[in-house]
Amino acid sequence: MKLLREIFGYLLGGLLFVAAIPSLMWIASQKPDVWPVNFVRACFAGLLMLGGLALSIWTIVYMKKRGKGNPMDAFGHEVAPRTQHLMTEGPYRFNRNPMLSGTLIYLAGIALWLWRWQAWLVMVIFFAIMLVQVLSEERRLRQDFGEEYDAYCRRTRRF
């Protein structure tokens, strides 16, 4: 059962962050042509998308290996098994939310590729919703890890 919940968490996260949000950005932008695109803009957008995905994947792998858990925790509801260890190294040495940072970098690449203000608006709304999630998660992490988490917060920025 634990393995099924874990697989479900990864699939749900992938579908939501890599496919559904970009699709919503495209639809909100009135379905612009995705090809051809300006070469220079395509290069920058592609670098952002690949870099953002790489950071998110690195974070997921690190979370699984070091934290012994899964990233899918939605507003205090455990979608898949939560991490058991506070992670402060690897991608977490740069900021406390590297997976979200990677996702936002990826979505910025999508918005740049689409070149529509509506895509940026969807990204900003997504960020606002995720900020509420981050604040909820921080309360849980304080409960789970106490002073260790507080010390980590003092030396590492949120984003």
Image (spheres, rainbow, N blue to C red):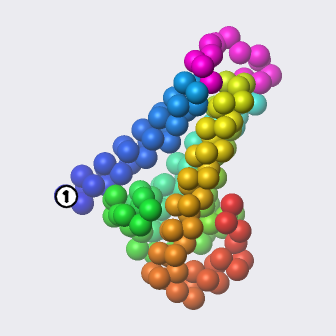
Query: Residue at the bottom extreme?
Result: 147
The residue lying toward the viewer, choosing from 46 and 143, is 143
Q: Tell me the quarter of the picture where residue 116 sits.
A: top right
Residue 44 in the magenta stretch? The answer is no
Most frequent secondary structure within the magenta stretch:
loop
Name which quarter of the figure residue 105 lies in: top right
Against 122, residue 138 (above or below) is below
Magenta region = 29-42
Residue at 65%, 32% (x, y): give it.
119
Q: Quadrant of the C terminus?
A: bottom right
**Residue furthest left as drawn:** 1
**x and y percentages locating residue 1 in the rendered image:** 19, 58
Q: Is residue 45 left or right of residue 7?
A: right
- What is the three-letter code of the residue carrying label 1? Met
| Above or below: residue 151 compared with residue 126 | below
Q: Is residue 78 left or right of residue 98?
A: left
The residue singled out by tag 1 in the image is 1
Characterize the local packing of mark 1: few (<14), some (14-19) or many (20 or more) Cα atoms within 10 angstroms: few
142 up-or-down from 1: above or below:
below
SS for dot 1 = loop
Query: Which quadrant of the figure has residue 114?
Result: top right
Whether residue 99 is visible to the viewer of this picture, yes or no, is no
Q: Name the residue at 62% across, 50% down.
A: 127
- Picture residue at 62% right of the left edge, 24% below the top: 29
- State the image coordinates of residue 48 (x, y, percent, origin top left): 69, 37
